Amino acid sequence: AQVRMFQAMKLEALGQLTGGVAHDFNNLLAIIISGLSVISRSQSEEERASLTASIEQAARRGAKLIRRLLSFARRQTLKPEALDMESWLTEMAALLKPSLRPDIDVVAQATPGTAAMVDRGELELALLNLCLNARDAMPEAGTLTVAARHVHLAPGQDADGLTGPFVEISVTDTGEGMSEQTQGRIFEPFFTTKPAGQGTGLGLPQVYGFAKQSGGAARVESTLGRGTTIRLLLPAAGSASSGTSRPRTGAFPGAE
Ligand code: ADP
């Protein structure tokens, strides 16, 4: 049943793709084509320079859209490795800073000795998705906090039935927050509140799919006007029972 559900979700996603992303992509192509035709006729050096810049920007957005689509469609098997959170977060914070804005303070903190059993590449993609969303939610400066700590979930304690040792990675922003209604939809493929051409609605589905596929979970807490925390629960490394918990594994919310 789960396989059938997944096929149905995929078909539905494909339908939304034709309506949504293809539309955005087509708009970008229109900008590129009309820009090129004006350039070929333009006598003004200044106009050519400014058109070249907007064509490049449109092409880059198109490339980004396709990259996201591909990484979403890929869903390759994960290759988990033990990853020390403290050194990884220090490295990631340095890597991420240039993609954020100077008016965003970045705080990264991990409890020493915390290690997760995860696919590093997919985790980095997930963190990037979360941090770029946090940036977009803070148009007027703010603080982005990324934290990692060890948690032990006792039977009956967790809403999704996760039990055992986990690493919790939380990404918190002091941005605009989300309504309850938006919170209920953010993990759906192609759900976006961003202007056409800017949002793909594929960031959080990647985050959600990765967390679920890893044997963990992804959750949201948000208050309008205050900010948002997205929490990932991922299996802890270096523990005999890691990976033995059996969470329900839906590809998307509602797919289980
Ligand atoms: P995209 O960023 O392309 O819109 P995502 O799947 O990453 O796609 O996010 C879906 C939607 O979730 C966003 O359009 C936005 O409405 C909401 N969202 C995600 N992260 C945040 C955040 N940190 N603060 C406020 N809203 C957010």
Image (cartoon, grey):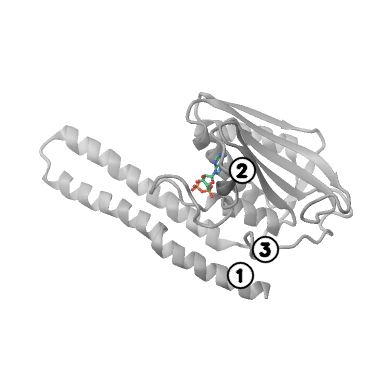
Q: Give 59 or 206, whichever is nearer the viewer.
A: 206
Relative to 216, residue 45 above or below = above
Please state which amino acid type lies under the numbered disc 2.
Leu
Q: In which quarter of the image is the N terminus?
A: bottom right
- Residue picked out by circle 2: 127
* SS of the residue under disc 3: loop
Residue 178 drawn at (x, y percent): 56, 41
CA distance for labels 2 and 3:
21 Å
CA distance for labels 1 and 3:
8 Å
Q: How crowded is mark 3: few (under 14 residues within 10 Å), some or many (20 or more)?
A: some
- Residue at 38% in and 60% down: 22
Is 10 situated left or right of 91 in this image?
Answer: left
**Picture quadrant of residue 129:** top right
- Residue picked out by circle 3: 250
CA distance for labels 2 and 1:
25 Å
* SS of the residue under disc 1: helix
Q: Quadrant of the C terminus?
A: bottom right
> Dots 2 and 3: beta carbons under 8 Å?
no
- Residue picked out by circle 1: 6
Please state which amino acid type lies under the numbered disc 1.
Phe
- Residue at 47% in and 46% down: 193
Please state which amino acid type lies under the numbered disc 3.
Gly
Callout in the foreground (2, 3): 3
Q: How crowded is mark 2: few (under 14 residues within 10 Å), some or many (20 or more)?
A: many
Q: Residue 63 carries which label?
A: none
- Residue at 50% in and 64% down: 13
Residue 43 drawn at (x, y percent): 10, 38
Is 140 situated left or right of 124 in this image?
Answer: left
